[in-house]
Amino acid sequence: MKTRKLILMAMFVAIGVAGSAFVYFPAGIARAYPIQHAINVIAAVLFGPGPAVVIAFLTGVVRILTGTGSLLAFPGGMIGALLAGLMYARFGKIWIAALGEVVGTGIIASLVAVPYAKLLLGTEFGALFFIPPFFISSLSGAILGIVLAARLMNTDRIKIWQ
């Protein structure tokens, strides 16, 4: 079962990397990449907080190495995945996992991004600079994640992967 789980996690990383190259839209001064947020919700529901964070981390690493992402992918993806996983583990509802993703990425990670960006990227942006694009991206991805996770949970085939 561990091998199957690792295969599915690797598939989610690949979908996250490929999805960020093709699915994005303008969100204020930045671009929104909703596929990662949808994957965070799905991974939180299927695997829990730890594997969801690993998927977000690995997706961020590959995106940075391929030039399709920035260092902001780490706090944005990982904090949202962690909170989505914790919320689903606690309450067992997909929509609450999605809410965890939005709060984790859209609010908490956007606030963490301020000192993070100053330290690692040398930028001096305020909190309000990051909140709108992070929030829009995480909200749109979380909605997609709710739809996909609900559909996956209604299939018998997904139970072999858990």
Image: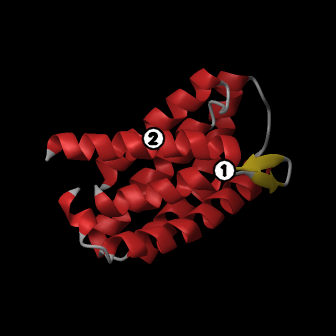
Write down the quadrant of residue 47 in the picture: bottom left
Identify the residue at horizontal 67%, vertical 40% (top origin). 21
Q: Position of residue 34 (x, y in %)?
A: 63, 56
Neighbour tally class for label 1: few under 14, some 14-19, many 20 plus, Cα within 10 Å:
many
The quadrant holding residue 86 is bottom left
Q: Secondary structure at mark 1?
A: loop
Residue annotated with mark 2: 13
- How many badges with numbers are in the image? 2
Disc 2 crowd rating (10 Å Cα; few below 14, some 14-19, many 20+) is: many
Mark sitting earlier along the chain (1/2): 2
Q: Out of 79 and 70, give the one closest to the viewer.
A: 70
Look at the numbered disc 2 and give the secondary structure of its residue.
helix
Q: In the shown orientation, is residue 27 left or right of residue 83? A: right
* Residue hosting label 1: 33
Residue 93 image point, x, y percent: 36, 77
Residue ranking furthest to the front: 157
